[in-house]
Amino acid sequence: QVQLVESGGGLVQAGGSLRLSCAASRSIFSFNRLGWYRQAPGKQRELVVTITSGGSPNYADSVRGRFTISTDKVKDTVYLQMNSLKPEDTAVYYCYARTIPNIDYWGKGTLVTVSS
């Protein structure tokens, strides 16, 4: 069983920055896909960014150029640096990982609120 634990959410003013962290319970080398999704109130969960082993990140158009995914393979942690935040970025952000074979895991989420 894989556990993903997010942290770093909170309240920030528009234009500000936050960095989310996702700590995995096992080596992130074991995942063939990692990423972040988000769900705003009353909306469906949507992709923010995913990354495959050896591949380039795939960002949603709405966050490209503002958000950056990174990994720390020593700490088995995935980060999401979010800059130039907008009120429409307000959502619960979920960490995601896919193992081989294709089994998906999700964190419980961390709330990001951007005030105008």
Image (cartoon, grey):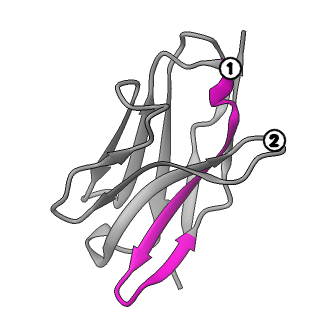
* Amino acid under disc 2: Pro
Q: Position of residue 89 (x, y in %)?
A: 62, 29
- Horizontally, residue 33 falls left or right of residue 24, namely left
Q: Residue at 54% of width from left, 74% of height from top?
A: 105
Q: In terms of image quadrants, where is residue 94?
A: bottom right
Q: Residue at 42% of width from left, 85% of height from top?
A: 102
* CB within 8 Å, label 1 to label 2: no
What kind of element bears circle 2? loop
Q: In terms of image quadrants, where is residue 108?
A: bottom right
Read off the magenta span: 87-105
Q: Position of residue 77 (x, y in %)?
A: 38, 55
The CA span between labels 1 and 2 is 12 Å
Residue 91 inside the magenta-drawn segment: yes
Q: Nearer the viewer, residue 85 or 29?
A: 85
What kind of element bears circle 1? helix
Indicate the quadrant containing the C terminus: top left, top right, bottom left or bottom right: top right
* Farthest residue, direction front: 61
Q: Position of residue 76 (x, y in %)?
A: 34, 61
Q: Is residue 56 above or below residue 88?
A: below
Q: Please name the residue that numbered disc 1 is placed on.
A: 87
Q: Position of residue 36 (x, y in %)?
A: 49, 51
Disc number for residue 13: none
Q: Residues within 10 Å of mark 1 (few under 14, many from 20)?
A: some
Q: Nearer the viewer, residue 62 or 13?
A: 62
Q: Please name the residue that numbered disc 2 is placed on.
A: 41
Q: Earlier in the sequence, mark 1 or mark 2?
A: 2
Q: Residues within 10 Å of mark 2 (few under 14, many from 20)?
A: few
Residue 31 inside the magenta-drawn segment: no
